[in-house]
Amino acid sequence: MWINNPRNGSKSTIVNSLENTPVSRSTGNLLHQCPGCNNLWAISSYRPVAGDSVFFRTSPARQNGELTRVISDARHPDFCWCGVPFPGTTAVQVSQSFAVANLHAALRSALSLMGEKSSVLDEMQILTTKVTSSMLRKLRGERSDRGAAAA
Ligand SMILES: [Zn+2]
């Protein structure tokens, strides 16, 4: 759940510590409900050390009349699909802009893995962590020819 900070209009949420994350009795996995998007995760207690790898999912999309798949979600290990980190040794407060930055970094990694142009992400101002259809269009390279947008 994102909590509004009335002083500066930013949003933030709290990620529990590992200690306060419930453990499944049947599997022994940590049961973590992401405070950013409510996604439920079963996290193994024996996770390998997270490198700089990236996980991503693709969705079907139509490009020049042909059906292709485009990257629609990406995340780094120890992060949710929304960019909010998994529980660590201590509880942490996470701002929504931090989560969005994480999401963008993961999308960039995924795009570069796929050999696609990722600079377009820098031009976008995204207010939510949701990957929108217009974002997908931009990721697929369907951009206007306005040239580089001023920040
Ligand atoms: Zn999440």
Image (cartoon, rainbow, N blue to C red):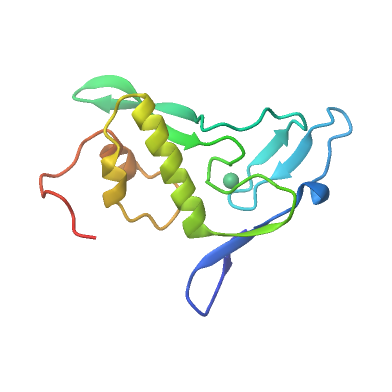
Q: Quadrant of residue 64 in the image?
A: top left
* Residue 55, above or below 122: above
Residue 139: image location, x then y, percent: 30, 37
Q: From the viewer's perspective, is 73 left or right of 3? A: left
Q: Is residue 42 visible?
A: yes
Q: Which residue is pictured at 44% across the width and 55% down the height?
A: 128
| Image position of 18 with respect to 111: above or below | below
Q: Is residue 28 left or right of residue 81?
A: right
Residue occupying the far bottom of the picture? 7
In the rendered image, residue 13, in percent from the top left (x then y), is placed at 62, 60
Estimate the x, y position of residue 142 in percent, counting from the top left: 20, 37
- For residue 150, what is the image quadrant? bottom left
Taking 149 as reference, is 111 left or right?
right
Q: How many marks?
A: 0
Q: Which residue is drawn at the image coordinates 11% and 48% (left, top)?
A: 147
Q: Where's the N terminus, which quadrant?
A: bottom right
The percent position of residue 44, horizontal first and vertical second, equals: 74, 30
Residue at (44% x, 51% y) in the render: 101
Q: Residue at x 41, y 37 (%)?
A: 107
Tell which of 49 and 7 is nearer to you: 49
Q: Determine if residue 129 is in view.
A: no
**Quadrant containing the C terminus in the rendered view:** bottom left
Q: Nearer the viewer, residue 11 or 112?
A: 112
Give above or below for 67 relative to 77.
above
